[in-house]
């Protein structure tokens, strides 16, 4: 009984602390910090994947940051990028293979939380199988993507 009463006392103190907290702190200075909330990220919808460019432009010199959402059931064909790309899997399982011979059954899953580097001019293919997956990509432009399947 004493433990139950202490639990209620703790809950009451926690609720009081929340009520007595100040509502909002000082506003952030946009010269110091830029925040884009998830609902304000501009996704460019595609048939096989969606892309959101958060910073920069992959076709121009300099750093760019993108998110890519692979739609479940879609895989790219073998290709390569002209510059290194640094990728974190944010959600889902990302599947990938390497080499010019397309082998979707041999693709390896890479789970959320993993970090991957796509090395410049090296052939790979990737996508999502049973669920969408979301990637966070950082690279430097100008970056081009070139198909690499054998003729």
Image (cartoon, rainbow, N blue to C red):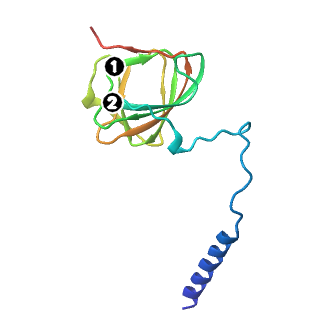
Image coordinates of residue 149 in percent, x first then y, are 30, 14
Q: Residues within 10 Å of mark 1 (few under 14, many from 20)?
A: many
Q: Quadrant of the C terminus?
A: top left
Q: Position of residue 2 (x, y in %)?
A: 58, 90
- Residue 11, position in %: x, y? 59, 78
Q: Please give left or right for residue 140 compared with residue 90 in the image.
A: right
| Residue with the mark numbered 1 | 78
Q: Which mark is residue 138?
A: none
Which residue bears the numbered disc 2? 48
Instruction: Give the structural element (helix, strand or loop) at label 1.
Output: loop
Query: Residue at point 34% right, 19% down?
Result: 78
Is residue 96 in sight in this rendering? no
Dividing the image into 4 quarters, which one contains the N terminus? bottom right
Note whether residue 48 is visible: yes
Q: Element type at marker 2?
A: loop
Q: Looking at the image, is 100 positioned above or below residue 64?
A: above
């Amino acid at each position: 009984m004493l433990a139950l009463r202490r639990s209620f006392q703790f809950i009451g103190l926690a609720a009081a602390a929340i009520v007595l907290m100040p509502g909002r702190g000082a506003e952030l200075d946009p010269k110091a910090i830029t925040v884009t909330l998830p609902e304000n990220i501009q996704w460019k919808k595609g048939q096989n994947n969606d892309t959101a460019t958060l910073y920069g432009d992959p076709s121009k010199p300099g750093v760019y940051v993108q998110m890519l959402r692979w739609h479940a059931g879609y895989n790219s064909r073998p290709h390569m990028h002209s510059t290194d790309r640094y990728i974190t899997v944010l959600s889902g399982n990302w599947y990938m293979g390497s080499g010019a011979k397309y082998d979707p059954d041999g693709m390896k899953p890479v789970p959320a939380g993993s970090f991957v580097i796509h090395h410049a001019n090296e052939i790979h293919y990737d996508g999502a199988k049973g669920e969408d997956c979301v990637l966070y990509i950082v690279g430097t432009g100008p970056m081009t993507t070139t198909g690499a399947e054998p003729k």
